[in-house]
Image (tube, coloured by chain):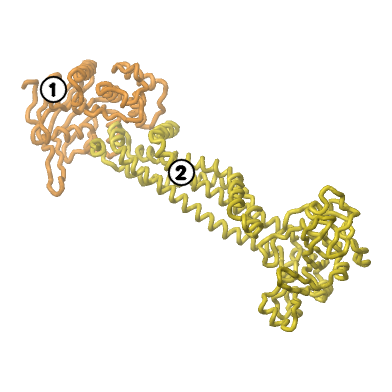
Chain colours: A yellow, B orange
Amino acid sequence: MLNLLRTVQLALKSLMLHKLRSGLTMLGIVFGVFSVIAMLAIGEGASQQAQKQVLQLGATNIIVRSVKPPRENASAQNQNSFVLRYGLKRADYDLLSRTIPTVLQAVPIREITKACRYLHREMNCRIVGCTPEYLDMNNLELAQGRFISDKDRREKTNVCVLAAQAAEELFQFNDPIGQSVKIADRRYAVVGITAAREASAAIGGSMSGQEFNKDIYIPLETMRVRMGDLDIDRRQGSFSAEEVELNQITLTISDVDQVVPTAGVIRESLQGTHKSGNDYSVVVPQELLKQAAQIRTIFNVVLGSIAAISLIVGGIGIMNIMLATVTERTREIGIRRALGAKRQDITTQFLTETIVLAGSGGLIGVLLGLSTPWVFDGMKSVATRFFFESGGGSEFSEMFTNLNPQVVPASLPLAFGISVGIGVIFGMYPARSAAQLDPIEALRHE
Amino acid sequence: MSLAAQVIDLQKDYMLGAVPVQALRGVSVDFPRGDFVAIMGSSGSGKSTLLNLLGALDRPTRGKYIVGGRDVSSMTDDELSTIRNEKIGFIFQSYNLIPQYTVLENIEVPLHYRTGYPTIGDREQQRIRELAEMVGLGERLDHRPFQLSGGQQQRVAIARSLVNDPEIILADEPTGNLDSKTEQEIMEMLLRLNREGRTIIMVTHEPAVARLAKRQIYMKDGVVAGEGVFPG
């Protein structure tokens, strides 16, 4: 072998002879390496996001949710009524909470979106009728005051707890505690405020995560008495009414290992009471976690192949240029052979040049890759400005803007290694063909 | 009188398309140490083929070529490279410097390919400088070939041919591309090297240049047609 340091030094010298050409050739590898790192970072970010959201649902929880059935089925069932009746019944709650031994606790909730008002300020909030357990079950924390108590339930008092954003928008600079919010023509005294928290994983066939920040919590019993099960929605000439007893039952299971079997039991029990079987869904966060892992694998394979293709294209670019270089420098090869270079020396020389080229491309790509989060932020702001403008907060754009790429440390040496490997693979043929040249022919070459 | 190199009944056949051509048909010449031989002949006479064989760039079809006490005719490609590196210094008509290298780096090239790849240390660097000064380029060590005149480039080539202290120096029309004044300078340099004891084999078709050598060999149709002292 030639003296390594000197060989690299001379390779750099030859490459610097054609700066533009070397630079352009390198670009292919730069982008290839960058995309490997960026894609892995995006995949990692997405999976972390999914995992965090799923964990917020609670690993030992099972969530049973009412789902509005498709229109055709519904009308067939309720031909004589304007009112669409669907979803979980209070009887379901009794059934699930009393008959399944592994269920530690069951929390029923009812949600309706209504306009809420304080003084002249009004906003649409999700009114959640719930029980005291709701707080812990959703990992919510109180910022101020107290949550709904059992006494509130028993006495069906008109109290409410505001989520962070709702409190801020309705009260702004005033202290909400002790004030009252007007919901559907009735006043509710504010007794507490929850701290802001991130949305959790999407459930019940929706892509968007559950947002907790615009909620207003009131006791479930109060809600039943004041608002009833019927929710009438009038807007722009259309009229619809839904009758839902419970929107969601969250069940906490005694043991992590029991979650999946219990989910099976729950599905079976509900099949008995819901013949149509399409007006509720059972969500198991643990299963979501597994799904997320699967999606991540698919994600990585797809993105990985795209990155691999761009690296191969980069490699072909390098090979192309090196073949041209060998032809162009045939004379030089002849001179070196005459001065005593062995075939192996010529191979080493050109291979080194290719590896140096690919390696420097790889290095630049790694540096670019490290900047993925910033690049992605830029993309986000551009995308939000130009593409999601009309959609406002569509589910996809929400998912996109909540995504924070995480550069995987292992991907840096990996991507750099691949770039060097590309140099070796695609440099081998040009280097060998250079070495195979006949010295006499090469010397005569113009 | 010891021999620097010796060829014995050297033959070389080529396939020119489907037609076999005998480029050399039995050449035997002795090159004593300190000799200065001019090989002359018209094109097609086989002098280029002979030079390629003498330069160990090619192997003869038959016959022997002995340089430094070893027979080159049956060596492997790698062994031929070693012979070229250690025993032979090349000077070409078109200088054949490496364009991206400076004067110093060009002189250095043969050192890269020495057996065992020893590091190029201060002693070698010193030798390269001395050689550059000897050929009168002490002021232009960092110039690249395109910044030099033809004569200067050829002097770099001469310095390069000497760096590994070879047995013989092969010069292929060393003054072919130069004007008469520079030609004279280069020839004086070669003559000086010869006086210092170097063996030089030079191919030329200019009688005026050939006359400066100690003896001349005339090639014709792949054999030595005449040998002697000019104007023989």
Q: Where's residue B106, x and y in %?
A: 33, 27
Is A445 left or right of A122, judged from the image as shown?
left
Residue B3 showing in the rendered view: no
**Which label number is shown at residue B63?**
none
Q: Between A135 and A418, which is closer to the camera in this rendering?
A: A135
The residue sitting at the bottom extreme is A80
Is A15 left or right of B192, judged from the image as shown?
right
Q: Between A159 and B138, which is closer to the camera in this rendering?
A: A159
Q: Between B162 and A395, which is closer to the camera in this rendering?
A: A395
Mark 2 is surrounded, within 10 Å at the Cα level, by few (under 14), some (14 to 19) or many (20 or more) other residues, namely many
Q: Where's residue B183, x and y in %?
A: 19, 20
Question: Do the residues at discs 2 and 1 belong to one chain?
Answer: no
Q: Is residue A153 above or below residue A175?
A: below
Residue B159: quarter of image: top left
Residue A170: quarter of image: bottom right
Q: Could you say whether the residue bearing mark 1 is in a helix, strand or loop? A: helix
Q: Is residue B48 above or below residue A310?
A: above
Residue at (71% x, 71% y) in the render: A237
Q: Which amino acid does label 1 sit on?
A: Ala
Q: Where's residue A70, x and y in %?
A: 67, 75
Q: Are marks 2 and 1 in contact (CB under 8 Å)?
A: no
Q: Mark 2 points at which residue?
A: A27
Q: Could you say whether the residue bearing mark 2 is in a helix, strand or loop? A: helix
Q: Nearer the viewer, mark 2 or mark 1?
A: 2
Residue at (31% x, 36% y) in the render: A333
Q: Where's residue A265, x and y in %?
A: 75, 74
Is B165 left or right of A115, judged from the image as shown?
left
Q: In this view, does A282 lie above or below B199?
A: below
Residue at (10% x, 30% y) in the render: B41
In whole angstroms, how far apart are the C-alphas of marks 2 and 1? 55 Å
Q: Mark 1 points at which residue?
A: B210
